[in-house]
Image (tube, grey):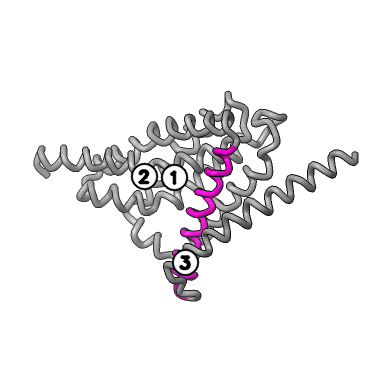
């Protein structure tokens, strides 16, 4: 690879990281929202760092890994769970009596969700790097500050404007449903069309938000009668 090609590939990878950091930053912000502000950055950095290490290990096998049945299905369901959990906890203060294991639970949520969401990103970076291992590592490592910085901003935005939580949850539900419906097993079994996917995403957003609000009201009534 010539110096010019190296520089072009490096610039391309930076652009890919910037363009693809949004969804990953959002899922991290949602996953660590239940933590006290002092622990959010730790959870974000630890989760994103572990995820990048796994991404580097998976880069060579990324194309094959994407075709393994149930991988994207499991990742999509995890993202749906994160969106639902944040919505049912929306009335709780973010730093209200966190459990001892909540930090590491959030870290593992971040790792698992980030890895399954980033398989396509891995392929994009690997393709832009033209097989250059140093550029691949550079691209994946560079995603950490982008994602952590973006997730920190999103967390603060959600604290200040609760409606942002609903918007974020809706985006995560869409991402989770899309991942679930594009899993090889689901595609072979159901053969979902593009229209069916859009309708399922819209229906899932309505169901998740409505179910979470219903559950919150039940919890509120239960606490009121104690």
Residue at the location (41% across, 41% down)? 22
**According to the image, label 1 marks what residue?**
23
Q: Nearer the viewer, residue 22 or 185?
A: 22
Q: SS at mark 3? A: loop
61 to the left or right of 90: left
**According to the image, label 3 marks what residue?**
69
Q: SS at mark 2? A: helix
Any magenta on residue 107? no
> Which mark is nearer the camera, 3 or 2?
2
**How far across and how far down the image is residue 12, in percent?**
23, 42
Residue at the location (10% across, 38% down)? 3
Magenta range is 163-188
Residue at the location (90% across, 41% down)? 225
**How far across and how far down the image is residue 55, in percent?**
39, 46
Residue pushed farthest right?
Answer: 226
Q: Earlier in the sequence, mark 1 or mark 3?
A: 1
Decide: marks 3, 2 in contact (CB < 8 A)?
Answer: no
Distance in Å between CA atoms under marks 3 and 2: 24 Å
**How far across and how far down the image is residue 127, in percent?**
24, 52
Quadrant in the picture for the N terminus: top left
Residue pushed farthest top?
Answer: 38
Please tell me how crowded label 1 is: few (under 14), some (14-19), or many (20+) other residues with Cα within 10 Å. many
Quadrant in the picture for the C terminus: top right
Decide: marks 1, 2 in contact (CB < 8 A)?
Answer: yes
**According to the image, label 2 marks what residue?**
20
Quarter holding residue 101:
top right
């Amino acid at each position: 690879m010539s110096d010019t090609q190296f520089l072009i590939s490096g610039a391309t990878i930076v652009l890919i990281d910037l363009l693809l950091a949004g969804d990953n930053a959002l899922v991290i912000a949602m996953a660590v929202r239940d933590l006290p502000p002092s622990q959010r950055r730790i959870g974000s950095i630890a989760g994103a760092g572990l995820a990048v290490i796994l991404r580097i290990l998976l880069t060579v096998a990324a194309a094959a890994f994407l075709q393994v049945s149930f991988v994207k299905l499991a990742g999509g369901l995890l993202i749906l769970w994160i969106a639902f959990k944040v919505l049912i906890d929306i009335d709780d203060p973010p730093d209200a009596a966190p459990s001892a294991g909540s930090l590491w639970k959030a870290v593992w949520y971040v790792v698992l969700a980030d890895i399954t969401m980033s398989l396509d990103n891995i392929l994009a970076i690997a393709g832009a790097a033209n097989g250059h291992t140093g550029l691949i590592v550079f691209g994946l490592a560079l995603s950490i500050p982008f994602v952590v910085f973006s997730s920190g901003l999103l967390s603060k935005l959600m604290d200040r404007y609760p409606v942002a939580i609903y918007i974020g949850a809706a985006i995560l539900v869409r991402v989770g449903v899309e991942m679930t419906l594009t899993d090889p097993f689901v595609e072979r079994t159901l053969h979902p069309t593009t229209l069916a996917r859009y309708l399922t995403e819209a229906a899932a957003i309505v169901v998740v938000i409505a179910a979470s609000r219903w559950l919150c009201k039940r919890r509120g009534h239960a606490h009121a009668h104690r």
